[in-house]
Amino acid sequence: MSRRLAAITGVGGYVPSYVLNNDELSRMVDTSDEWIMQRIGIKERRILREKGKATSYMGAKAVKELLAKTGTDPLDIQLLICATVTPDMHFPATGNLISDKTGLSHAFSFDVNAACSGFIFALETGRRYIESGAYDKVIVVGADMMSSITDYEDRTTCPLFGDGAGAVLLEPMENGLGIIDSILEVDGSGAKHLHMYAGGSLHPATHETIDARQHFIFQEGQPVFKMAVSKMADVSVDIMHRNNLTHDDIKFLVPHQANMRIIEATARRMEISREQVMINIEKYGNTTAATIPLCLWDYEKKLKKGDNLILASFGAGFTWGSIYLKWAFDPK
Ligand code: UT7
């Protein structure tokens, strides 16, 4: 018997039905389908438009699907971790709201804020709770309603983001399948390039902060792009090397979906082909903490027991990281 690993034993997902495509965006700001496809690779994104619904609504939808698909009793879940930068409210944690909406009344829950690396950071956290032997059923959710903090008058950021949620179930396995290795890193000095300026304790909401449009995403695209290309590729290659993996061993890279050019640069450094990369940026855009679980959701049927996956991300913070895992189940 090999050591106790945390394995993903199910995937759930949810995207809102409203499709915001590049043509509609081109009527809102001075942009074009051609520019967005060439520079980013996004055709359309999903937007949650119903009043009274927010991140926890999408997270709960993903968790409900996960519970149904895996035949799991909500009362058996012991912990739910939610990665998000768009919580329903500053507090309580959105994880608590999702647990309440899905009947996880025996679970405790909390949120993780690592922006686009949120899912990887939360997965690493959930993994350790399982490996320690403390818990046997943990749900990790990545959910973001980016439309709630996107400035639809700013053409440099509004084409990038969309709304969505994905969730995975983690359970222990002792057959060599599951999460094997991880590398997580941060550099807080990157905060100046990508942040939401107001609404926190440093700059609480005032008429001035609202008039100055400071409750939206601020991004300096180029420095973020440069760091993303080098750091996401570095951690992906590092985790391959230290686990003695070559490009032939990799079934899929599961990259954060921020920009097609960042994804391609990472794949090139790993010397893997396009067929070995999960890509859905064209239809969902950057859903922040939800991109990686939504890729797993979309590609689930192509995955088999024992497949080697490298998950990789880069995001605000700066935060970046990679996780190496062996997929634990065949298509159902
Ligand atoms: O997920 C979190 C981490 N975030 C990222 O990974 C995002 C990283 N950054 C990027 O993906 C890219 O920097 C962007 C997609 C945001 C921007 O692409 P870029 O190739 O870096 O463009 P740029 O900012 O250098 O702008 C080039 C030109 C500028 O015009 P001038 O000054 O050359 O005349 C911009 O004003 O493109 C212009 N531009 C646009 N034109 C049409 C910027 N946004 C648009 C737009 N439509 N939407």
Image (cartoon, helix red, strand yellow):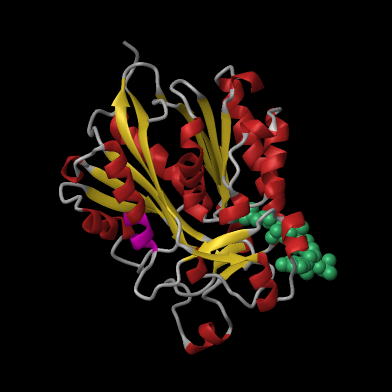
**Above or below for 155 versus 44:** below
Residue 311: say if magenta: no
**Above or below for 15 versus 51:** above
**Residue 248 at x, y = what percent?**
64, 19
Side of 182 relative to 98 (left or right):
right
**Residue 20 at x, y = what percent?**
58, 67
**Residue 151 at x, y = what percent?**
58, 74
Q: Quadrant of ligand 1?
A: bottom right
Chief SS of the magenta region? helix
Quadrant showing the C terminus = top left
Side of 166 relative to 72 (left or right):
right
Camera-side residue of 151 and 130? 151
Q: Which residues are magenta?
A: 55-60
Quadrant showing the N terminus = top left
Residue 179 in view (yes/no): no
Q: Quadrant of residue 93?
A: bottom left
Residue 56: say if magenta: yes
